Image (spheres, grey):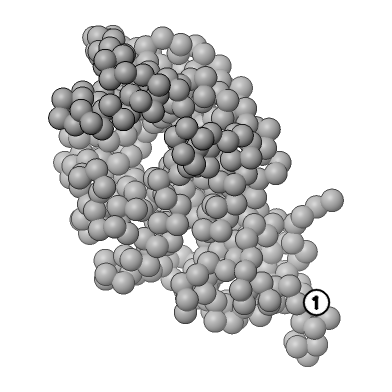
Amino acid sequence: MTSLLPPVRLTGALCLIDGALHDTDLTIADGHLADMPGADAADLSGYWLLPGIIDLHGDGFEHHLSPRPTAPFDTGRALLAADAELATNGVTTAWFAQSWSWEGGTRSPDKAEEIMAAIAAQRAQFLTDIRLQIRFETHVTDGHDRLLRALARYGVDYIAYNNHLPEALEQARDRPDRFANWAASQGRTPQQLLDIIHAAKAHDPQVPDLLAALAPQLAGVGVQMASHDDGDAETRAFFRARGARICEFPTTPNAARAAKDAGEPVLMGAPNVVRGGSQAGNIAAQDLIEDGLCDALVSDYYAPALALAAWALADRGVCSFSHAWEMISTSPARIFGLTDRGNLRAGQRADLVIMNPATRRIEGTIANGQIAHLSGGAAARLMRPRTARALAAE
């Protein structure tokens, strides 16, 4: 049994196409946007139809895995709950960011492979297109063969280089209370965690050559590479030389500018925009956007922030709503080479959001031609019997 929408023509709404809202009809048929004038019509006057949100980095799913640090839930069920949350917030394609780290526990290679397997097992039940980004800690110097096998087996197509050792050492020195809480969440003493950090740090001399060897192997299995938290142009150059062509969460304008000067896309967090700055004290995403140094926004730790950020940027006069929405849909598609989505054109996947601009609520999300979320007035209009719609049209 298929759950695809029957052919339907959405009329009356304003549609975001080529950077502007246009008064035109959209037709959905067989999971795609189509040119089919005779399809049954549904009147969505007063609504906006927008490309589905494409989230290139989000770790909010962790809250579903462990709502409390000591209360984990079944991985498969947790992923289904996270999938429903995405759909409610207009996300039709998402990469869950999972660590492969020296930290162990929920950020261990074992946990990463468990999540890979769970995504594969649940894929047929997902409402949205969920993929995995591996946040690879650069100082995991063994097990690269295992990583490559796992990526190839589960079709993982995205990896981000991370090096959180400086941050960890800084926290141990300056915030011993937070460091102790971090250790306790892993069932370790602060000294045990510090020993692990120092052991990883001892691999400093090996890291450049190991990453240089790993990069072509990653590319060979179809993996795109990014670097995370670049602090300066030198760091960006280091990771660029090791295959990372996406700059994710640069912490300074210099790092972002170095990426842009090299023609590389820069990703920043939508929560940073909504809250007016970084919760970690780094550069404000809005400043980078105003300076033309940010190409796309990602959910980071809070999926609702994606749509909220588009409204915030428009309200603050930073850019038009249309441009802001493209930063969470069309631009991510272009950055990742997804030619089948991110636009509302015939032949594309039917990935779209039904926005009520009066309330700013997402009342509907259609993912690959299937209803993933539907509520409010949009639900009433789309669910009207066909005969009633036909009579209304006459």
Q: Is residue 211 above or below residue 291?
A: above
Q: Is residue 386 above or below residue 153?
A: below
- Compared across the picture, whether 258 is left or right of 391 comes to left
Q: Is residue 321 above or below residue 46?
A: above
Q: Residue at x 45, y 57 (%)?
A: 304
- Compared across the picture, whether 362 is left or right of 7 comes to left
Q: Residue at x 26, y 47 (%)?
A: 279
The quarter of the displayed image where residue 122 is located: top right
Q: Is residue 317 above or below residue 235?
A: below
Secondary-structure class at tag 1: loop
Q: Which residue is mark 1?
A: 385
Decide which of 320, 309 is in the foreground and name it: 309
Decide which of 278, 11 is in the foreground and name it: 278
What number of labels is visible? 1
Residue 291 at x, y percent in the picture: 20, 56
- Compared across the picture, whether 199 is left or right of 156 comes to left
Residue 347 at x, y percent in the picture: 64, 57
Q: Amino acid at mark 1?
A: Pro
Q: Residue at x 39, y 28 (%)?
A: 185
Q: Residue at x 75, y 87 (%)?
A: 393
Decide which of 164, 197 is in the foreground and name it: 197
Residue 244 at x, y percent in the picture: 35, 30
Q: Residues within 10 Å of mark 1 (few under 14, many from 20)?
A: few
Residue that protrudes farthest toward the bottom in the picture = 394
The quarter of the displayed image where residue 174 is located: top left
- Observer able to see residue 340: no
Residue 29 at x, y percent in the picture: 73, 61
